[in-house]
Amino acid sequence: MSLQKLLIFTLFIGIYTSCATAQGPMADKAPMVKKVALVDGDIRATIDKMADEIDAKVIKWRRHLHANPELSNREFNTGKMVGDHLEALGIEVTRNFAKTGVKGVLKGGKPGPVVALRADMDGLPVTERVDIPYASKVRSTYNGVETGVMHACGHDTHVAMLMGAAEILAGLKSELKGTVVFMFQPAEEGAPPGEEGGAKLMVKEGILDNPKVDVAFGLHINSMTEVGKIRYKAGGTMAAADRFVITVNGKQSHGSMPWGGIDPITISAQIIQGLNNIVSRQTELTKEAAVITVGMIQGGVRNNIIPESCKMIGTIRTLDPDMQDIIFDKIRLTATKIAESAGATADVEITRGVPVTFNNVELTRNMIATAERVAGAENVIVQSAVTGAEDFSFYANKVPSLFMFLGGMPKGTSPIDAAPHHTPDFFIDDSGMKLGVRTLCNLAVDYMEK
């Protein structure tokens, strides 16, 4: 071979080697998901098959998340795990949405509506007491107090189920008649003091825009509902949660001479009784439930000093907007008039928080057949409204939505014996998640086809 030919050959080999090396990292970043062949041409049968195949993976994700919980607006590792998973599936990802959230957009192979599916990601300042291999040992600081951190409301299952649904739907991308928006949301339990967060901030930052979402679906695991069952209610399904602060201003005096002052602690006790009467005697409870709870009372620094003021802080739970306004007015009236009757004054501050979680009646009517087909009609149960709150309501205020409860209690267990949410003994049976994955996928597919 001549020197000229040898040089040309060497140059060609160098260029080829360089190109091949450059393609390596790109290949690593290529989507990991493959197009899935339909089982007998049936997308729903295919979803069932895929849910069976990835169930062990979903359980593994959930247990990892359970062992590594993060507090509200601090879900850094959870957000990274979710974002990496969606990107590996070829889904368009926006990270750091509403601080630590993740938005994924999967555009189907055919035109159609935009369906949003939501999972919340944050844990709670609760020290776990459940004896399981993946129990949380995480410690952190909340409101200046050292505490354990635990997924004591099941958000770890929500993340794992939506990750599983994303994997299935990504594999069926060419068959989808529309677009799916995956909303992995931080801070459902409430942002830390002084911070914004949760669904309200997700909406503010445009999670329902670009593409414009037509409907939203959400599932919440429930520790007192048996695995395999789904509960729902059309209309108002979870309560609005509002905060009130009542400050009673009296006159300080020696504890041995109460007649020399105006006792704000005694007046506060009378106001608390009056607040209870608002619900029991002045509210139309046959229409909807309502709750007024004083959860904190602050007054005084010493046993023998009647303080100058006393503060009460509490929550208001309502399921009807008109009743909500009426109760607000009655709280102001009750507190101020009781205080005046004793020669004191009362300042009342009411802050609107999370709105009523409202299941669009028409959407619920149209989609409940999906839940009945997936879970079996006998396992889909109409329930009464609950006075717990959910910030999924901020999505439901913007687009027609449906929010349902998924069973997580081991079969054969009595609800009386199951630990409630937000407690150290809270427990969820992993076997219930497969139904959640199938339900999320089928809600999206059925709405697109309808």
Image (spheres, helix red, strand yellow):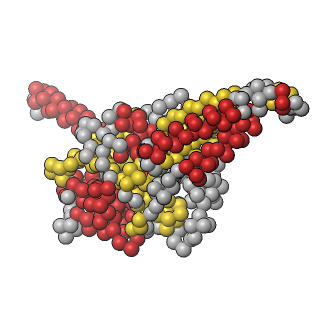
Residue at point 10%, 30% (across, down) = 5
- Residue 108: give x, y in percent of width and height: 20, 49
Q: Visible in this render: residue 393?
A: yes
**On-image quarter of the N terminus:** top left
Using the image as rendered, state which of residue 249 and residue 215 is in the foreground.
Answer: 249
Q: Visible in this render: residue 28?
A: no
Using the image as rendered, state which of residue 377 and residue 409 is in the foreground.
Answer: 377
User: Furthest residue to the right?
Assistant: 256
Query: Height in image: 289 above or below 325?
Result: below
Is residue 221 left or right of 193 when viewed as pictured? Answer: left
Residue at point 48%, 36% (across, down) = 352
- Residue 427: give x, y in percent of width and height: 57, 59
- Residue 98: give x, y in percent of width and height: 41, 34
Q: Which quadrant of the view contains residue 313?
A: top right
**On-image quarter of the C terminus:** bottom left
Residue at point 23%, 33% (across, down) = 18
Query: Height in image: 364 above or below 101?
Result: below
Q: Which quadrant of the view contains residue 420?
A: bottom right
Using the image as rendered, state which of residue 252 and residue 375 is in the foreground.
Answer: 252
Is residue 223 left or right of 363 when viewed as pictured? Answer: right
Q: Which quadrant of the view contains residue 185?
A: top left
Residue at point 25%, 65% (across, down) = 44
Label tally: 0
- Residue 293: give x, y in percent of width and height: 61, 46
